[in-house]
Image (cartoon, grey):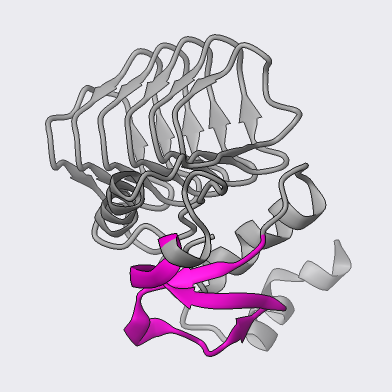
């Protein structure tokens, strides 16, 4: 497994407890090495990983977040492939049997994926996210928890969807789009589009004053 951050910790949990695959080691770029061990696993630097764990005998999974619109993870996947590694995926057993997906994909437990869905390479779908029927998600995308992708949607590469973001039915979205928390997109979007909803305004009342005035405790 490439990575030693919080995302890697989450992915490691699923590989250890919900997968038939066994994670044998962690690899990172040398400046980010956590030491000789991480989470009970031996750590080797990425520039030496092929010597310690040859790609003819081991697969790799790149457990990195969505930095730079997923470019960091995509680039590391490309480097791993160039070394000869096949990239593993973890797809929750509850996903439809006809789900088509590329390499280095992750579909978490309690994600809701409909039949007739296609995921490209290096797509991460977090818990609570929904991907509607006949939708296609491009390479290197990240769907955070409770993202809602309606049916017959086409999403380009390197897109990011924040918590509770929603795409309407039949929408086509270009590459490198950013959809923020609670944003609703009902029309097609060009490459690089950004959709952001403002935060809920804070009341002038503090919580105790609000409870007294609203009589919330009497409900």
Residue drawn at the location 56% of the way across and 49% of the way down? 58
Which is more toward the observer, 9 or 26? 26
Q: How many marks?
A: 0
Q: Quadrant of residue 32?
A: bottom left
Q: Quadrant location of the C terminus?
A: bottom right
Residue drawn at the location 50% of the way across and 33% of the way down? 148
Q: Is residue 164 left or right of residue 183?
A: right
Q: Residue 133, position in %: x, y? A: 53, 12
User: Which residues make up the magenta segment?
Assistant: 24-50
Q: Is residue 175 left or right of residue 62?
A: left
Q: Residue furthest right?
A: 218
Q: Quadrant of residue 111?
A: top right
Q: Residue 65, position in %: x, y? A: 42, 60
Q: Is residue 208 left or right of residue 196?
A: right
In magenta stretch: residue 37:
yes
Q: Residue 120, position in %: x, y? A: 39, 28
Residue drawn at the location 55% of the way across and 69% of the way down? 26
Q: Residue furthest bottom?
A: 35
Which is more toward the observer, 137 or 39? 39
Q: Is residue 6 left or right of residue 197?
A: right
217 w.r.t. 30: above or below: above
In magenta stretch: residue 215:
no
């Amino acid at each position: 497994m490439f990575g030693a951050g919080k995302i890697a910790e989450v992915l490691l949990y699923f590989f250890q407890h919900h997968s038939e695959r066994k994670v044998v080691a962690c690899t990172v770029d040398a400046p980010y090495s956590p030491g000789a061990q991480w989470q009970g696993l031996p750590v080797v630097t990425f520039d030496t990983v092929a010597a310690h764990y040859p790609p003819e005998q081991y697969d790799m999974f790149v457990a990195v977040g969505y930095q730079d619109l997923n470019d960091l993870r995509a680039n590391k996947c490309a480097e791993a492939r160039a070394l000869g590694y096949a990239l593993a995926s973890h797809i929750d057993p509850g996903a439809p049997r006809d789900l088509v997906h590329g390499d280095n994909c992750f579909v978490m437990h309690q994600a809701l994926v409909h039949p007739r869905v296609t995921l490209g390479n290096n797509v991460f779908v977090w818990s609570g996210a929904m991907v509607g029927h006949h939708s296609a998600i491009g390479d290197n995308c990240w769907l955070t928890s409770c993202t809602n992708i309606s049916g017959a949607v086409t999403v380009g590469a390197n897109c990011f969807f924040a918590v509770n973001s929603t795409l309407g039915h039949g929408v086509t979205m270009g590459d490198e789009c950013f959809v923020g928390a609670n944003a609703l997109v009902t029309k097609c979007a060009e490459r690089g589009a950004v959709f952001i909803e403002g935060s809920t305004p804070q009341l002038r009342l503090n919580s105790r004053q609000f409870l007294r005035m609203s009589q919330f405790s009497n409900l």
